[in-house]
Image (tube, rainbow, N blue to C red):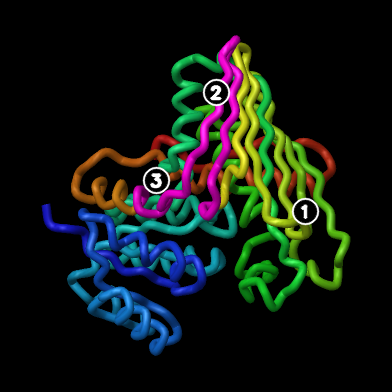
Amino acid sequence: MPPVGFAVLGLGTLAQTAILPAFQGVQRTRLVALVSRDLEKARRLASLHGVPCAYDSLQECLENPQVEAVYIATPPGNHFQEAEEVALARRHVLCEKPLAVTAPEAAEMAAICARQGVLLMTAYRKCFEPSMVFIRDLILSGRLGALKILHASFSERHALPQTSPPWILDRRLAGGGPLMDLGIYCVHAARWLAGEIPFRVSAVQWTHDRSLFREVEEGIAFSMYFPSGLVAQASTCYSAALSSMLYLEGTHGSVSLTPAFPYEHVRLLNARLGDELVNKDFPVVDEFRPQIDAFSHAIRGGPLPSSCGVDGYVDMAIIEAIYGAAEAGIPQAVKLHYSTEN
């Protein structure tokens, strides 16, 4: 099968350091176009990475018949409009998380792509990362037993605006604070590992530095309650040093992973499985390449990754409930208004 022709939309730090280099090793994919509001930047990066076309207009890019799919790596507030434009041009959509800034927008993105007959995938790279896959295999094998407790945390300091992306504290573009940017990893990991959707959440949020965090929360802690009885507790904030962890307890054992979510660091896993102790180091790997490859394979008729379709919408519905619980001060039900069968 010929490689899938990809364009990358949005050439910020993530695209330059992780997404563009990842395309170099994917045999099923060919990077054929870059799109940025800054045409000179697009041309410079296209030359650097051997990409034949550079644009400052998504519409012009979509007129290129070589472009079959678009990796959207822009701020979340732009995702809905851009994904709609891509889907209406009958191109497939691989979109960075969060899928959108609201659950209704995410649902509509899934619906538009379904109507247009194109694939939609949220870029949840941890589904392909070896340490997370190892933990999921432990769960599926039954070695942890029934899951009872999950703890997760992911924080990063954004105390100096000049060192952060300009949109990160802008509610219109970011959709929210650390819950949208970092906490979503905790939400998705819990749901993916448990294999089920929480039915209720509770939360508390805080802002100490109101001069900096004027539009979004500084931090938030939340709990998710699953039908099986699993309780997942998580926290995230923009005023702590870069750090993350994941810890699970089951009826037969426990497992911890730290750091759990950044892609730049070696991960250390410790598990107790009955009387057996397991200690493993997981080296840094390219976490973006496998998801690009899996999406390209699906475009060519291969199996659909779990993060295709409405997966990103489900997390946005959970996040909507978490924000609602924090604002109301009481637990909120997770309401899905779009069928997860679509």
Instruction: Tell me which numbered mark, 1 or 3, is placed earlier along the sequence.
Output: 1
What's the amino acid at mark 3?
Gly
Q: Residue 40 sits in which quadrant?
A: bottom left
Where disc 1 sits, the SS reads strand
Name the residue beneath numbered marker 3: 309
Please check the rendered image and state whether residue 274 is part of the magenta-colored stretch, yes or no.
Answer: yes
Up-down: is 277 above or below 6? Answer: above
Residue name at image x 45 percent, y 17 percent = 141
- Horizontal side of 133 relative to 247 (left or right) equals left
What residue occupies the far bottom of the structure in this picture?
Answer: 40
For disc 1, the neighbor class at 10 Å (few under 14, some 14 to 19, many from 20) is many
What's the amino acid at mark 1?
Gly
Where disc 2 sits, the SS reads strand
| Image quarter hosting the C terminus | top left
Q: Residue 2 sits in which quadrant?
A: bottom left
Camera-nearest residue between 217 and 275: 275
User: Which one is in front in this view, the residue at disc 1 or the one at disc 3?
Assistant: 1
Name the residue beneath numbered marker 1: 219
Instruction: Tell me which numbered mark, 2 or 1, is placed earlier along the sequence.
Output: 1
Residue name at image x 62 percent, y 65 percent = 174
